[in-house]
Amino acid sequence: MKINEYLEKVKSKEISVVKTVEKILQEAKNSPNHFTAISRSYALEQAEKIEKNPEGRLAGLPISVKDGVCVKNIESSAGSEILKNYRPPFSATVINKLEKEGAIIIGKTSQDEFGFGGFSVNTKKIPKNPHDLARSCGGSSGGAAGFTSFATQPHIALGESTGGSIANPASFCGVAGLTPTYGLVSRYGLIDYANSLDKIGTIAKTVSDAFLGLYHIAGYDEKDSTSLPQKMLQEKKVKKIAVIKESLNVDKEIKDIILSKLKNYDTISLPSIKKYSLPAYYLIALSEASTNLAKYCGLRYGQTLPLQGGYNEFFTEVRSKYFSKEAKRRIILGTFARMSGFRDAYYLKALKARTLIIKEYKKAFKKYDILVSPTMPVTAPKFSEIEKLSPLENYMMDILTVGPNLAGLPHLSLNAGFKNKLPVGIMLTANHLEEEKLRALGEEVEND
């Protein structure tokens, strides 16, 4: 059943919200590690209220939430042991907006610790891909995309992207992942990875469902200093599209699947993005992550230990125990890049490269409405294959998704077809606030 059809049946009381929520809660329980917390009693309590009085444009719609987005009184740990058992005393703005419209929060989905990873393996509870349980869901919003693919009941997932954490798992799981313009959706209540890059978006089975979710979470929020007062532009007509030449240096079968979904297109070269996007992204993101994670020192935020020794000893003991190996690696890299003596050579240079990348995109959008590429250079890998990858090889997997994220551009990943029964994602990128063009072309590709 399509979500709009379900919502209409809820309004007319032709369908039981309680029974729908009970079914999806059972699916959440049976899913292969897609959830870190299931809010069964809270969800059923809300379902009973809405069944009696179905008010709101999303009345009765189940919503899963990435673990890094705060939901009042529900464990929100961002996939990290250092925040284990943290139950926020407030909800993120996006949660308040959804609940105001009658949506029902069913639980928190698995993710890489603080978003650090592209395979959702940097956490205790590793989600498995419904297409093949021996393979990754992608990351860091792996549980969100995995459950969206797994669930049979009407449902929308909230994800979060810093460098591709919505598009990546959407590609691996064969669903639609929508990352909005930076600042279009409030970040208030999101546990930070990198402030200048983090974006909350939606994941759903179809493009229209992903946009349905976006329409209800977008908008200005005075609690978020990066929130945009502008709204999405309503122009939907897509006149010209271009495939990014550098993105086609992938497996021939993936390339052929992507190009088969397009009718009339040009090819465009974006050399600065190929050359600078990955190093610029990791320098900026890890510098900001190093700063954001400094507050988890055992004194005020996160886990603690008995007070003993000097401050540095205590600080080191807490962080050594509760941060994962990958979190420590990223903290060290980020701290180095912003240290006195290295800041000019690395961090500030990365910011200049980011400006160059934005200018290159803007130049391309003067001629084209949408830029197209594969979402990922590979299909979902096996966990046994991921174990053999070096940290650098892990980071290289983001090569196609970091560009739009660095520039704060809206992008949409959807399924273009299958290679050896595994989904292949196609990524559409538009200019700032031109999400409606993504929807127009995305639905055309989806229905082809």
Image: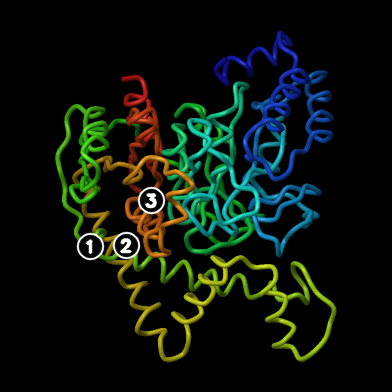
Marks 1 and 3 close (CB-CB < 8 Å) = no
Disc 3 designates what residue? 409
Crowding at dot 3, Cα within 10 Å, few <14 / some 14-19 / many 20+, comes out as many
Per the model, the C-alpha gap separating discs 1 and 2 is 7 Å
Residue 287 location (% of width, % of height)? 49, 73
Looking at numbered disc 3 in the image, what kind of residue is underneath it? Leu
Q: Which residue is mark 2?
A: 277
N-terminal of the two: label 1 or label 3?
Answer: 1
- At 51% from the left and 79% from the top, the residue drawn is 335
- Looking at the rendered structure, the kind of residue marked 1 is Ser
Give the percent coordinates (x, y) of residue 184. Answer: 50, 49
Please report whichever mark, 2 or 3, sits nearer to the chain's N-terminal start: 2
Q: Which quadrant does the N terminus fall into?
A: top right
Q: Which residue is mark 1?
A: 272
Q: Nearer the viewer, residue 15 or 183?
A: 15
Residue 393 location, quadrant: bottom left
Residue at (69% x, 68% y) in the render: 322
Q: Are marks 1 and 2 in contact (CB under 8 Å)?
A: yes
- Tell me if residue 165 comes above or below residue 223 in the rendering: above
Q: Is residue 39 left or right of residue 375?
A: right
The colour scheme of the drawn protein is: rainbow
Q: Label 2 is placed on what type of residue? A: Ser
User: Nearer the viewer's eye, disc 1 or disc 3?
Assistant: 1
